[in-house]
Amino acid sequence: MTDSYDVVVIGAGPAGSFAAETAAAGCDVLLIEKRQEIGDPVRCAEGISKPGLSKFVQPQEKWIAKEVTGARIFAPDGTKIEVSARLAGGEVGYVLERKIFDRDLAKRAARAGADLMVRARATGLITGDNTIKGVTVQHLDETLKIPCSIVIAADGIESQVGRWAGINTTLKQKDIESCAQYYMTNVDLLDTCDFYLGSEAPGGYAWAFPKDHRGGNIGLGVLGSRLDGRHSIDYLDAFVERHFPDGQRIELNVGGDPVSEAASTTVKPGLMLVGDAARHCDPITGGGIINALEGGRLAGEIAKEATRLNDFSLKVLQRYEEAWRASFGKTLDRNYRIKEVFVKLSDEDLNKLVHSLEGLTLEEMSVSGIMRRVISRNPRLLMGLRHLF
């Protein structure tokens, strides 16, 4: 380590590691992670699209647990529709080994020149002259003051860094999913990512993603406002008993997932928020790896530009916010509006929506075409979405 850095990145998930790697091409960078092991625990169903991943990195065989051919969507009454990987969105194509994937992204950052520190928890920002001057970090039993010019906050859904800088990162209960997932064996899954709609996961959905021979991720997310005093694990256990009664639980992971609008602002003088900290998850699926990589790349590029200019003002860093909003901001806005309609639908309503797609060859239709078909056949339920498609 050096005495000071141009950039300190807080959080070594995909957004943080990719930001660190990108910035390291022109800056002195420190990447810190509060956990002792990067990539563990896994708080993710681990799905990602092939073209989405390939846009940023060359996929490595060791990252891929399973290639999947598409998705199946199950209505509450068991009716299913099959969707190709091309149409299924950012969570279908590969099922990753996130523990390996996340560590390799951190390795890439280190090889690009970034310093890494694990078991290092950011405890505050050092400020002065209306900008950030550094970060205080608790590393093992030592408190460190690390001077820097830019902080990139990739500290996840519980982001405190943004709050310290005066950004409101509070999530309403209706905008957060309480998630639980088992890795299970003795489950028979096809080469598809399966999604289950309805009251088994109120306000969210359940999933079954294959990973290996008779093994996969079985999980669900329940909207915080719909938990009714239960824990997401209770809903998951009931789902497993119904659909995978012979499965054996090998690993359990729990956590929250933002399904909110993007943060109203993601920049302050000397600060940029990326990934879950910026609320860049897809509000419909809760998936966020692709947006995390894109946001991390953009933040890293702007960090390099600001360092070259020796200007860490809001005027310069605002270019990051303008860039991510131009890249995927409109999609986030649209999908939040869709989510707000769908979470109000009953099981009977969801059955009607799925039935309206029966008999269609979905491979021949675009996502917009499918949505227009559903809306036209269910105008009472989805009239509020007509203008979006």
Image (cartoon, grey):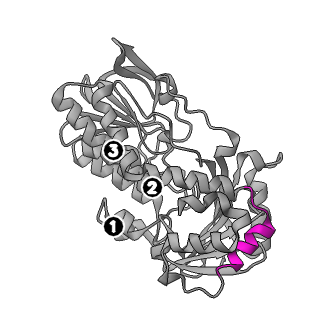
The image position of residue 299, as x and y in percent, is: 32, 41
Nearer the camera: disc 3 or disc 2: 3
| Residue at the spot of label 1 | 59
- Cα distance, mark 3 to mark 2? 17 Å
Q: Nearer the viewer, mark 3 or mark 1?
A: 3
- The residue closer to the viewer here, 210 or 251, is 210
* Main SS of residues in magenta: helix
Task: Report the residue marked by disc 2.
Answer: 289
Q: Residues within 10 Å of mark 2 (few under 14, many from 20)?
A: many
Q: Earlier in the sequence, mark 3 or mark 2?
A: 2
Dot 1 alpha-carbon crowd within 10 angstroms: few under 14, some 14 to 19, many 20 or more: some
Give the side of residue 150 with respect to residue 155, left or right: left
In front of the other: 26 or 96: 26
| Residue at the image point whose x is 19% and y is 43% from the top | 25
Q: Which residue is mark 3?
A: 323
Indicate the secondary structure of the residue bearing disc 1: loop
The disc labelled 3 sits on which kind of residue? Ala
Question: Disc number at residue 236?
Answer: none
Residue 343 is covered by the magenta coloring: no
Q: Nearer the viewer, residue 233 or 107?
A: 233
Q: Look at the image and give the residue range highlighted in magenta.
A: 344-357
Kind of residue sitting beneath label 1: Pro
Secondary structure beneath label 2: helix
Frontmost of labels 2 and 1 is 2
Q: Above or below — where is 138 with respect to 211?
A: above
Q: Earlier in the sequence, mark 3 or mark 1?
A: 1
Q: Type of residue at label 2?
A: Ile
Residue 140 point in image, percent of width and height: 46, 29
